Image (cartoon, rainbow, N blue to C red):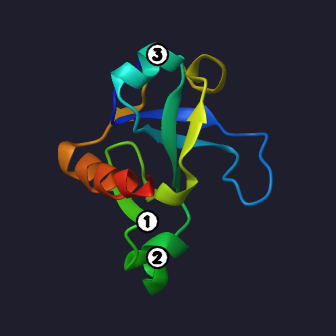
Amino acid sequence: MYSQGDVLWIDLNPTKGNEEGKKRPCIVVSNNHYQDFFNTVIVIPISSSEKYRKEKRYTKSMFFVPIATKHFEGTALLQHLRTIDPHIRAQKSPIDHLDKITMSKITNVVKHFW
């Protein structure tokens, strides 16, 4: 079972259209109740592209949250929220866990999607 805030390596392929693909770190944003009921998790991919950290249109937008941990640096792409089966797409163990402040920034934006 994964916890909200865990960072997992996820293979997001195959994709269609503008969906984020490749194998990349993703943040678990769903809670344990969701996971228990559906056997899936909702994740947000993290991009290592520098454009998200440098270009003003991204740095000023609430949809792009900078992420920095001891294992990687990147940007959470909140608009690419996605449900996955972690038993098929995820590496077994989390590679990291985000701090409460960063998770609060992410969940405060994501809750406005519905």
Label 3 vs label 1: CA separation?
Answer: 29 Å
Q: Circle 2 — which element?
A: helix
Q: How many marks?
A: 3
Q: What percent of the width, then of the height, locates residue 28? A: 43, 35
Q: Amino acid at mark 3?
A: Phe
The part of the image, by quadrant, that contains residue 97 is top left
Q: Which mark is residue 58?
A: 2
Disc 3: CA contacts within 10 A as few (<14), some (14-19) or many (>=20): few
Above or below: residue 112 compared with residue 34: below
Residue at 42% over, 48% down: 72
Q: Is residue 55 visible?
A: no
Horizontal side of 73 relative to 42 (left or right) equals left
Disc 2: CA contacts within 10 A as few (<14), some (14-19) or many (>=20): some
Q: Is residue 5 visible?
A: yes
Q: Are marks 2 and 1 in contact (CB under 8 Å)?
A: yes
Q: Amino acid at mark 2?
A: Tyr
- Give the residue at mark 3: 37
Pointer 2 or 3: first along the chain? 3
Q: What percent of the width, then of the height, locates residue 58? A: 46, 76
Q: Which mark is residue 64?
A: 1
Horizontal side of 95 relative to 14 (left or right) equals left
